[in-house]
Image: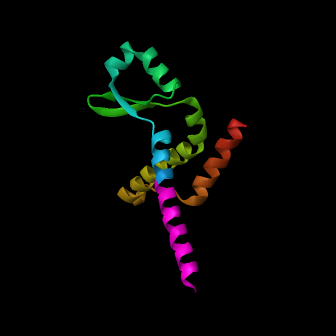
């Protein structure tokens, strides 16, 4: 590999790294929505203002009760975009809880055939 080729590759590498750093900064500046934490009592009093903040893209809102995060207000478009992932997360939590219950008392487990029959009959009742 010639010296000129090595120099061009080095310049390109420096350019790419610089571009990635600039892009990361831009992405952080544009995409990183500030999070405002608000006590639930304040949220009740200022609900309209909080909705305006979210709607205009100024911030996401985290509602606190007794210092604990209990709910978030995010733009509806964002919620629509992440809804499937959110459903997967919730189902995963339910599965984890069911597995923990099983581990705590394996004797209470229902055999698969019985469980499957119960699901099928429940589905027929709702059809």
Camera-side residue of 95 and 22: 22
Which residue reaches farthest top? 45
List x then y, in percent, for residue 111: 54, 59
Indicate whether 104 appears above or below 25: below
Indicate whether 119 appears above or below 76: below
List x then y, in percent, for residue 118: 61, 48
List x then y, in percent, for residue 102: 42, 56
- Please identify the dominant SS of the magenta region: helix
Look at the image and give the residue range highlighted in magenta. 1-21
Which residue reaches farthest right? 127
Q: Residue at x 68, y 36 (%)?
A: 126
Camera-side residue of 69 and 127: 69
Which residue reaches farthest bottom? 1
Horizontally, residue 84 falls left or right of residue 33, namely: right
Camera-side residue of 39 and 89: 39
Camera-side residue of 123 and 5: 5
Q: Where on the picture, by quarter, is residue 6?
A: bottom right
Q: Residue at x 37, y 56 (%)?
A: 105
Indicate whether 47 appears above or below 106: above
Q: Was residue 84 drawn as part of the magenta stretch in this picture? A: no
Q: Was residue 12 drawn as part of the magenta stretch in this picture? A: yes
């Amino acid at each position: 590999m010639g010296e000129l080729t090595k120099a061009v590759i080095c310049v390109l590498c420096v350019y790419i790294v610089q571009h990635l750093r600039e892009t990361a900064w831009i992405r952080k500046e544009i995409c990183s929505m500030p999070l405002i934490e608000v006590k639930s009592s304040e949220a009740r009093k200022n609900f309209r203002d909080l909705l305006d903040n979210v709607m205009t893209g100024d911030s996401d809102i985290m509602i606190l009760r007794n210092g604990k995060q209990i709910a978030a207000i995010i733009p509806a478009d964002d919620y629509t975009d992440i809804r499937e992932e959110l459903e997967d997360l919730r189902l995963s939590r339910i599965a984890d809880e069911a597995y923990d219950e099983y581990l705590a008392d394996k004797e209470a487990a229902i055999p698969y055939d019985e469980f499957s029959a119960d699901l099928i009959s429940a589905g027929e009742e709702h059809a």
